[in-house]
Image: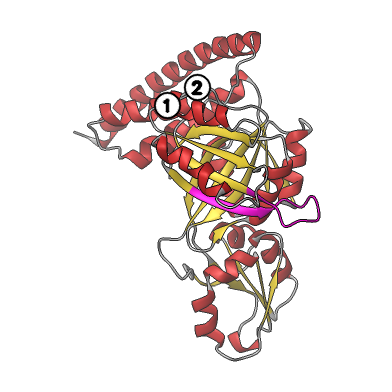
């Protein structure tokens, strides 16, 4: 078959694709009207996951799972903006890993607000200046982001979804000689994730590690100082035209960070694979066996706990703690709801959402 004929067939398929996409968007607009009238949340991650799973089962062509997800996540994002324009707050600046996570889920059509702190993301969503917020919650090598948990403790916002993402760091600098670098800027957790690289590169030599709000901020600062460097994302370095000397400098190739999507309402729709997050403030927590007794109720209900973190309650003079707990299941599952009801005075439900990691 000649190239011209092949291209003609591709053009014909593109024409059909455009027609079908417009037909889809017409239906999406009607869905948007229904959701607005009935006060239904526009963002429905369980519905999107169900579509991706169904298409994955149907697929018998050249597209792999990642390609199908990339294409349809963008279609979903365009669809949501037709239903109701979305504004997404995230820990900025542009090019940060949180920015990447936000765009991976909400696509290029949404309006994005890069903010300077996790606190600002919470406040922006809470005051309705953004529909959703995206913040990091934990890294599988270095643990939780305490700041996020602390603001979850004091906020009315809910978790509507999670975003797992592989994290790769670059070492970028304007310096022509590594020995001239006296300062390295990055997010504090990034230093820990790249400790072996830093030790191998500088050993006992004097180099100051300076933590900043984000890896993108590190790039901005390093641009102004030729004797400094940034540990950052590849995208951030390219975006600001800071030369990259080394790629993939993280200690572990399995490095992943989990991000949370924050909203003002709990997702009530169930999927086949949900997880839930709660905050627990135990009454009389200093009583012997109080925490063990509480956790035993989950064991007896056959509820699998996947994470438990403690944080200072920050109220009162005593050393009291709040527990941040993840577990498998949805709050509407019968065996889960019974435990939550039993401890309703001690539990704050942060959300039930599709389990992705």
Magenta highlight on residue 314: yes
According to the picture, the residue beneath numbered tag 1 turns out to be 271
Q: Find residue 187 and report its horizontal and vertical position in percent.
A: 65, 64
| Residue 211 in view (yes/no) | yes
Q: Residue at x 49, y 78 (%)?
A: 196
As measured in the structure, the alpha-carbon distance from the residue carrying label 2 to the one carrying label 1 is 7 Å
> Residue pushed farthest front?
288
**Identity of the residue furthest to the bottom in this view:** 204
Taking the image as shown, residue 314 lies to the left or right of residue 83, namely right
Name the residue nearer the viewer: 332 or 24: 332
Locate residue 17 relative to residue 77 in the image: left or right: left
Q: Nearer the viewer, residue 18 or 311?
A: 311
Relative to 190, say whether 345 is above or below.
above
Callout 2: 10 Å neighbours few (<14), some, many (20+)? some
Tell me the residue at 47%/30% (across/down). 336
For residue 269, the mark is: 2
Image quarter where the C terminus lies is top left
From this view, report whether residue 306 is shown above or below residue 330: below
Judged from the image, the secondary structure of the residue bearing numbered disc 1 is loop
At x 41% / y 37%, what residue is drawn?
A: 300
Where residue 340 sits: x, y (%)? Answer: 55, 30
Task: Judge whether residue 171 can be spotted in this image.
Answer: no
Image quarter of residue 210 = bottom right
Q: Which of the pair 101/142 is nearer the observer?
A: 142
* Residue 211 image offset from top left, x and y in percent: 69, 69
**Is 25 left or right of 236, judged from the image as shown?**
left
Magenta-colored span: 307-322
């Amino acid at each position: 078959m000649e190239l011209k004929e092949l291209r003609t067939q591709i053009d014909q398929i593109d024409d059909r694709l455009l027609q079908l996409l417009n037909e889809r968007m017409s239906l999406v607009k009607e869905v948007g009207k229904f959701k607005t009238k009935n006060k239904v949340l526009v963002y429905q991650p369980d519905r999107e996951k169900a579509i991706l799973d169904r298409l994955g089962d149907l697929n018998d062509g050249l597209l792999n799972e990642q390609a199908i997800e990339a294409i349809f996540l963008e279609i979903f994002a365009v669809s949501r903006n037709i239903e109701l324009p979305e504004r997404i707050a995230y820990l900025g600046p542009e090019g940060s890993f949180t920015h990447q996570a936000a765009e991976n889920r909400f696509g290029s059509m949404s309006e994005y607000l890069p903010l300077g702190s996790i606190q600002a993301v919470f406040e922006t969503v809470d005051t309705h200046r953004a529909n959703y917020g995206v913040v990091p919650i934990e890294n599988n090598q270095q643990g939780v982001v305490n700041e996020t948990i602390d603001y979850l403790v004091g906020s009315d916002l809910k978790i509507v979804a999670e975003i797992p993402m592989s994290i790769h760091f670059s070492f970028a600098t304007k310096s022509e000689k590594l020995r001239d670098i006296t300062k390295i800027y990055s997010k504090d957790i990034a230093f820990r994730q790249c400790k072996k690289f830093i030790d191998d590169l500088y050993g006992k030599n004097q180099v100051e590690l300076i933590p900043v709000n984000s890896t993108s901020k590190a790039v901005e600062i390093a641009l102004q100082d030729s004797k400094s460097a940034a540990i950052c994302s590849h995208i951030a370095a390219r975006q600001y035209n800071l030369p990259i000397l080394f790629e993939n400098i993280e200690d572990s190739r399995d490095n992943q960070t989990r991000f949370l999507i924050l909203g003002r309402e709990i997702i009530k729709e169930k999927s086949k694979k949900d997880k839930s997050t709660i905050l627990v403030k135990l009454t009389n927590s200093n009583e012997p066996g109080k925490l063990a007794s509480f956790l035993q109720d989950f064991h007896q209900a056959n509820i699998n706990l996947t994470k438990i973190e403690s944080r200072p309650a920050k109220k009162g003079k005593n050393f009291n703690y709040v527990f941040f707990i993840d577990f498998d299941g949805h709050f509407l599952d019968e065996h889960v709801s019974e435990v939550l009801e039993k401890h309703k005075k001690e539990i704050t439900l942060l959300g039930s959402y599709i389990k992705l990691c």
